[in-house]
Amino acid sequence: MTNPLKTQASTNLGLLLARLPMGAFFFLAGYDKVFHKGVDKFVELASSSARPLPFEVSHGLMNGYLHAIPFLELIVGTWLVVGMLSRLSAFVGSLMLVSFIMGATGVQLAGAPFHPNLIYLGVTLCVLLAGPGSVSLDQLVFNRKKKKPAA
């Protein structure tokens, strides 16, 4: 008897179940920043509470990045949920999570390995490395089945 958890269908379901909550998390975080709190208020709060980094970052670069975060969260979240450009969105999400970890903890992972952003990073890296699975727009749009040779 074969193990039902070692099938392609279970792998695809697992990847879908990893993508959906991670995408919803990013989308809702971005939505809250854009439509409820306001981007400028988020930038002001984030720049005042960020811990110092071990390297110098120009104020203009940091300000531009902080203004882009809410919109990136909306895009990454949407793409993860629907499975469009999943590896790219997981890569961008992973980079954002690394920056959140550095900005929030000053590169010192207090409470590691249970910092929530580390767990989220693990999920985004899983999607980055494994792909979106077959329940995704990527599969629908970019599916390239190999043609069988004519007999």
Image: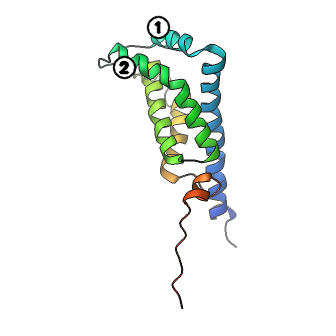
| Numbered circle sitting on residue 101 | none
Vertical comparison of 2 with 107: above or below: below
Q: What element carries label 1?
A: helix
Q: In which quarter of the image is the N terminus?
A: bottom right
Q: Is mark 2 on a helix, strand or loop?
A: helix
Residue at image x 31%, y 19%? Answer: 54
Identify the amino acid type marked 1: Ser
Q: Residue at x 36, y 20 (%)?
A: 61
Residue at x 59%, y 31% (from the top left corner): 74
Question: What percent of the width, then of the height, locates residue 52?
Answer: 37, 14
Q: In this view, does 11 lie above or below 16?
A: below
Residue with the mark numbered 2: 61
Q: Name the residue under label 1.
A: 48
Residue 84 appears at what percent x and percent y?
Answer: 57, 47
Q: Which amino acid does label 2 sit on?
A: Leu
Q: Where, by quadrant of the figure, is residue 107 drawn? A: top left
Between 23 and 125, which is closer to the camera in this rendering? Answer: 23
